[in-house]
Each structure stands twice: as structure tokens, then as C-alpha cells.
Amino acid sequence: MENFGVELMLAAEAECGECPVWDVRKKELLWVDIPRGLVHIYDPVADADRVFDLGQPVGSVARRASGGMVVALAEGFGFFDEESGRSEIVAPVETAGPNGLMNDGKCDARGRFWAGTATEPPEEGVSALYRLDIDLSVERVLGGVTLSNGMGWSLDERLMYYIDSTTGGVDAFDYDPDSGRLGERRRLITIAPELGMPDGMTVDAEGHLWVAIYGGSAVHRSSPHGELEAVVHLPVTQVTSCAFGGETLEDLYVTTARENFSVAQAHQEPHAGGLFRCRPGIRGVLPAEFQG
């Protein structure tokens, strides 16, 4: 089993860094700090990070084809334009009570934006997965969720991969790319509890899955059949998500967190909440943009 080295790109000290996504046009990495309501834009060439405060928790982000970003905010789906600093809710989403918020999200290849909800602390079965269509209508696709997190699609678009973190694994749904409908659900990958909890994920150009292991100091690469093939070890415990970027999509960026850290934990993990990068010699796929 291979192992890969990592380097710290940005000592951001994010409370909960999440949802890295590469901006192919501007050659920058978008990512968020969920509880602080921050959207980051990191330029790896200039080694510069711009930060925008959206005023409420932001679970995920993606580029819009028409400009700006689509974001999953505590109140629902919204748009954000970094040039003007303006953000707006375009499709409210119901979350579970005052502790509910939107969490991880991603665009599918047809330009729809998916994001789920969660509560803090997680309450079993009260959250859901939603889809924002290009006409800005919202569908509640999956209920009974506890902690909605990473997602991705097979290269032929016939499977959707999905993580409800507290279930301890990655599930695969039969998927209709034309309608965005989910079909039969089955377990693809199980993460033993002692290894940590699955969080965010991405899919590479070979169709393999890269899953961030929260509490496990690692990112796992698994085959489309679910076999573990490689591990990226990180010097921090709370590994939250990953995405390929860079000129040739060969850089794997990894976000991390420092949630509920004590002074002692912060001393033991000084780079927790930082943005990391490794180069595993494998390419990612072009991230989709929201077409609405």
C-alpha cells in the first residue's frame, strides 16, 4: 500500500475547513470555514489567501458558470460574488431546528448543486440531502440523514457516492444523470470506528475515491469496488475533505479542522485547521460548475 508525503500550504487555523474545490479558470482553490462563515480563495502561485465573511455558517461552495459562486448557507442555497461582496439567499432550505445548518456540497456534471444538512451536535435521522436545480428549484432527495457530508460521482455518471458520516462509510446509489434521481442504495466502503469517521471526498481520473477520515489523520484512496489502495497520512487529527487542483489537476488539497480544541490539543497539533497538499502522481477530474 502506497503512502504519500504532504506539505502545509496555509496555516489558516480554521475552526472547520471544508469543501475545497478548484477554480479552473482562475487557477485558485475555493474552500470554507463552516462555523465562522468564511469563504477562502487561495492562490497557490502567489501563496495568497483572500477571505470573505458571509455573516452566517457556510457549508460548501462551487463556482457558477455565469460568475460568482453558489453557496450552501445556514439559511439555504445562495449566491455570492466576491467582487462586490454581495451574498443572497436564492432558495431557502429547512434545517432541523435552531442547531441546524447546511454542510458539504458539490456540483454534478450537469451543473446541479447538491448539499446536505446537519445539526450541532448531530441528531440521528433529522437531516437531509438536497439538490438545487438550474432553475433554482430545490428537491429534498434523501431524508433520515444524521450528518450529511461528502459526495461524488462515477466517471460514467451512473453511480452517486454519498457519505452520512455517522453511518461509518461510503454508500453508492444508482444514479440517473439526466434527472438527478437516486436509485438503489448499497454500502461500498466501511470505515472501522477505530480508524475515524468518513467526511468529505473526491473522485480521481481513474474513478477511485479519496475519502477524508475525520479523527483519523488520513485520507484513504479506495478502488471503485471499495478496496483500500493507499493512505495519505497527515500531522493533524481532524481531516475534513480533499480535492484535486493545480495546472494539471495533480495536486491533492486537503482541508482540516480544530473543532473544540483545548489549549493542550492546539499545542500538540499547531497546524490543525491548515490547508495541506500532496502530489500522489494521479490526476483528478475537472470540477463541475453550477449552471443556474
Image (cartoon, rainbow, N blue to C red):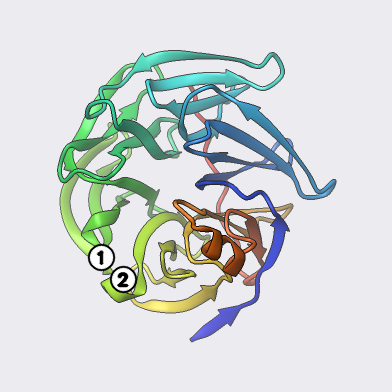
Residue at x 58% of width, y 47% of height = 14
Q: Is residue 251 visible?
A: no
For residue 184, above or below residue 103: below
Residue 26: x %, y % from top left:
74, 36
- Name the residue that disc number 1 marks: 188
For residue 287, above or below residue 226: above
- Name the residue that disc number 2 marks: 225
Residue type at tag 2: His
Secondary structure type for disc 2: loop
Closer-to-camera residue (32/137): 32
Counting residues from the start of the chain, the first of labels 1 and 2 encountered is 1
With 171 as the anchor, is 231 left or right in this view? right
Q: Are marks 1 and 2 in contact (CB under 8 Å)?
A: yes
Residue type at tag 1: Leu
Q: To which quarter of the image does residue 141 belong?
A: top left
Task: Calculate the distance from the C-alpha at mark 1 to the C-alpha at mark 2.
Answer: 7 Å
For residue 210, above or below residue 91: below
Residue 1: x %, y % from top left:
48, 86
With 60 as the anchor, is 273 left or right in this view? right
Q: Please tell me how many numbered marks the rendered image carries.
A: 2
Q: Furthest residue to the bottom? A: 1
Closer-to-camera residue (228/207): 228
Residue at x 53% of width, y 34% of height = 36
Residue 155: x %, y % from top left:
42, 54
With 85 as the anchor, is 178 left or right in this view? left
Q: Furthest residue to the right? A: 46
Residue at x 30% of width, y 50% of height = 158
